[in-house]
Image: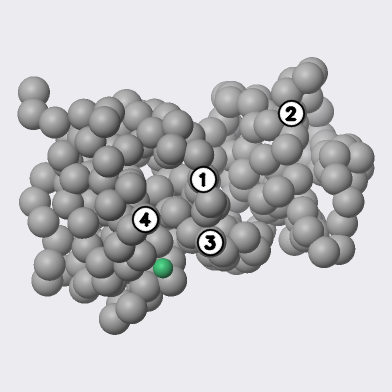
Amino acid sequence: MSDPRVLVVEDDLELSAQIRGHLEAIGCEVICWTEGHHVAEDMPPDVSLIVLDLGLPRVPGMVVLQELRKASDTPVLVLSARQETTDKVEALRLGADDYLTKPFWPEELQERVRARLRRPALQRADLLKIGALELDLVRREARVGERAVGLTRVEFEFLFALARRPGAAVPRRWLVNNVLDADLEGGERTLDVHASRLRKKLGPGLLETVWGVGYRLAAP
Ligand code: CA
């Protein structure tokens, strides 16, 4: 089998060279774009994964992502200096499979890339269905069976974070960093308050606590 081909889209040349080194070290063939391109015109063949910066000259990262999702299912790992929850949620909603914030540890990048190359593409519809639970990502509505569940913005994002990988525990620290508003809300205790409200709204058997780790959504 040939080496998996990874497209790295990063305008910082030094960082781009570093990423190339990290990925070649784990057996990837790396192609680098140093600005955003229109995917329909320029996409190289047989790309197994795209590592995508958001702040890019020419074509912004979010546009690259959007165009890509219209054309293909190639997994996308967003690598961005943007820390705001809204950027992460928007990137995930547009179909990114993972989101890593700069600065990052090389080992973490390598591990995420390895994991992504192993895994099949995630569910990537506007509607996520996990057992009786349905999440409408466009209208930002949740249902359990026939029952509509009114959720706050944070509760919806919390649930969405878990719903992307049903059955997998999502660490509390990740949830605090990615779901809560950093400037408005506190840490893990605030998260637990949201979890307890969310659990009440959803009813029993969906949101599970994984002691010492975080939370997960029961796999159907
Ligand atoms: Ca950039």
Q: CA distance from mark 3 to mark 4?
A: 12 Å
Labels 3 and 2 touching (C-beta < 8 A): no
Q: Is residue 98 left or right of residue 64?
A: right
The picture quadrant where one finds residue 65 is bottom left
Split into quadrants, the picture shows ligand 1 in the one at bottom left
**Amino acid at dot 2:** Gly
Q: Is mark 1 within 8 Å of ligand 1?
A: no
Within 10 Å of disc 4 (Cα), the crowding (few <14, some 14-19, many 20+) is few
Numbered badge on residue 104 = 1
* Closer mark to the observer between disc 2 and disc 4: 4
Q: Is residue 79 left or right of residue 119?
A: right
x, y (%) of residue 22? 32, 38
Numbered badge on residue 214 = 2
Q: How is this picture coloured?
A: one colour
Residue occupied by mark 3: 81
Choose the circle earlier in sequence order: 3 or 4: 4
Instruction: State the SS at label 3.
Output: loop
**Amino acid at dot 4:** Leu
Q: Is residue 46 left or right of residue 77?
A: left
Q: Residue at x 22, y 63 (%)?
A: 33
Q: Nearer the viewer, residue 73 or 220?
A: 73
Residue occupied by mark 4: 15
**Amino acid at dot 3:** Ala
**Amino acid at dot 1:** Phe
Choose the circle earlier in sequence order: 3 or 2: 3
